[in-house]
Amino acid sequence: MNYLFETNRYRFIVLISIVFISGYSQGMLLPLLSILLEEAGVSSSMNGLNASALYIGILFASPFIEKPVRKFGYKPAISVGLLLVIVSITLIPFWQAFWFWFVLRIIVGIGDNLLHFATQLWITTTTPQEKRGRKIAIYGSAFGLGFAAGPLSTILVNFSIYLPFLLASGIALLTWLMLARIRNEFPDSLTEGSGRVFSKYGHVLKIGWAALLPSFGYGFLEASLHGNFPVYALRAGLDVHAVSILLPAFVVGSLIFQMPLGILSDKYGRKTILLISISIGWLCFSGAIFTTSVPILFILFFLAGMMVGSLFSLSITYLADLLPNNLLPTGNILAGIFFGIGSILGPYFGGVFIDWFREGSIFYAISGMLLFLFTATAMHRSQDHTANYSTSS
């Protein structure tokens, strides 16, 4: 019986379940807390700032998570990350205060970053190369499905404010117990010094800035949609039920079209598909400025999700096209940082635009960002950088 818990399949199922819970908790917290803060009379800009706390936690933890994972292994890192998420989510409904929620969201971000780093590294280092792409696709889909399911829990607040939070923490606790049956493993030891870290980061930025911008754009888009749209929707006369339908429409659209976009980018080039996707996404969100019809918004959100819901994965693959192999780890770290910065700025600027404009406010911010993204991507001229980057002094 113990052999069952040592198999790669069981471990993969548990890790994917943990990633799903992470997506679910993030997808729940962003719209639900935004609605509760709006009903409490908090300004939209401050509401957006509170939504940014999750991503502040993610960025704060980034420089510190690698060393403990290498020292203690994957399992303790994931366990600590899950516990941080469980405790924080459980405490949220017991004291409805702006800065209390802000701090708890930061802690959730730290926990999410820790468990994501460890689960992703554990999966990639224990999967044969010929199966790695498929498993990482499942990994991304699990997070996306959780993120899509999260907003549906906003309906549960009609029964009790405690119910959605206790449900999320209870499911997370179940996966934590499942994790306890898995044997701990450690990453490979370091083989390279860190004396030229800043030089490597600068080199990646010089070569791959255009591929990093879609990561920023996706963070901006995702966080502003889930953090600001509930506030905008309530002020535009839409109800909580409409929010719980429209936000998953975007995520489901991205899940359905993620693989086709990847295949098309292999065939026609990453830059070409990025430009087409961004332009169609811009049209969808620009059209959303002029309507509050739930059916029309549902169609626009779904189409936008199909086109720009895969910006992060396209960003990573475009980066792989531009960078030499030995700079890809650094590139992936920077892609995560760009995503985090976009996720922090998105809810804040979305909140500011809600204060400035009445009709279509949040969509002005999103469509403006996509227009900037399209222009920057179109201007970029890639060069041949296939040779390895030397780290010698």
Image (spheres, grey):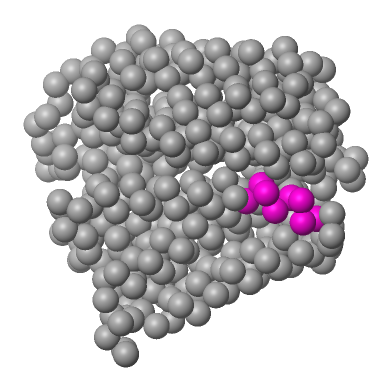
The answer to which quarter of the image holds residue 267 is top left
Provide residue 303's location: percent of width, then percent of height.
Answer: 52, 24
Provide residue 214's location: percent of width, then percent of height.
Answer: 42, 27
Residue sitting at x 34%, y 73%: 10
Relative to residue 49, is residue 73 depicted above or below? Answer: below
Q: Does the magenta stretch include residue 77?
A: no
Q: Can residue 155 be seen in this view?
A: yes
- The one nearer the camera, 342 or 134, is 134
Secondary structure mainly formed by the magenta segment = helix
Q: Give the range drawn in magenta.
A: 150-157
- The one nearer the camera, 329 or 232, is 232
- The one nearer the camera, 181 or 376, is 181
Q: Does the magenta stretch include residue 152?
A: yes
* Residue closest to the far bottom: 1
Residue sitting at x 54%, y 15%: 282
**In the shown orientation, is residue 20 left or right of residue 351?**
left
Provide residue 275's location: percent of width, then percent of height.
Answer: 38, 15
Provide residue 307's location: percent of width, then percent of height.
Answer: 45, 24
Residue sitting at x 66%, y 47%: 151
